[in-house]
Amino acid sequence: MDQKPRLGYRYEDLHEGMRFRSPGRTITDADLIAFAGLTGDFSELHTSDVYARASQFGRRVAHGMLGLAYAHGLMWARTGELRETAIAFLGISDWKFVGPIFVGDTIFVNYTLAELRDSRSRPTQAIANFDVELVNQDGAVLQRGRKALLVSKVPLAAVAASTAEG
């Protein structure tokens, strides 16, 4: 019987210092408008060309939280690197909004596994802390901070079963 290849890393593959880079995603006008509708944040800096031209940025800027949300999606959903391992997003710390994200920017996430430690309460789980940078197509850092993820030390059963079935 043919065995399908694994999807991403398992716990035993992980080690501190591992570096990753997400695929890119270009920010569009539709992203800004959809995010404004979703959150109710219709600030003119995000929605008015006239207002934004008069701002320090000279053009519309994406919501900072849109960048943070896309950073999360690019890291976990788009890469699939921890598909058989990731259980839950635990939080962020020291997150900084360093530079503006503009319509037309293509963003990427560079992230490093900074710390991997056993869970104190669950022997089959661990905590992975990642140092994260959201960058644009020119390599400029737009946002940065640390994200914590709860990971399983054993492949997640539902994912492992679906890959084996095929």
Image (cartoon, grey):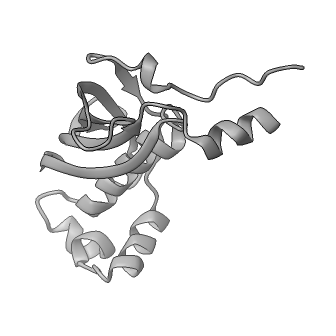
Q: Is residue 25 above or below residue 103?
A: above
Q: Position of residue 112 (x, y in %)?
A: 28, 25
Q: Nearer the viewer, residue 72 or 5?
A: 5
Residue located 64% across and 25% down the image: 6
Q: The C terminus appears in which quarter of the rendering?
A: top right
Residue 97 appears in the figure = no
Q: Nearer the viewer, residue 27 or 8?
A: 8
Q: Is residue 91 above or below residue 47?
A: above
Q: Specify the quadrant of the image occupied by residue 141.
A: top left
Q: Position of residue 85 (x, y in %)?
A: 47, 36
Residue located 40% across and 80% down the image: 37
Q: Position of residue 91 (x, y in %)?
A: 23, 52
Q: Is residue 160 left or right of residue 93?
A: right
Q: Position of residue 39 (x, y in %)?
A: 33, 78
Q: Specify the quadrant of the image occupied by residue 127.
A: top left
Q: Nearer the viewer, residue 99 or 54?
A: 99
Q: Is residue 117 above or below residue 75?
A: above
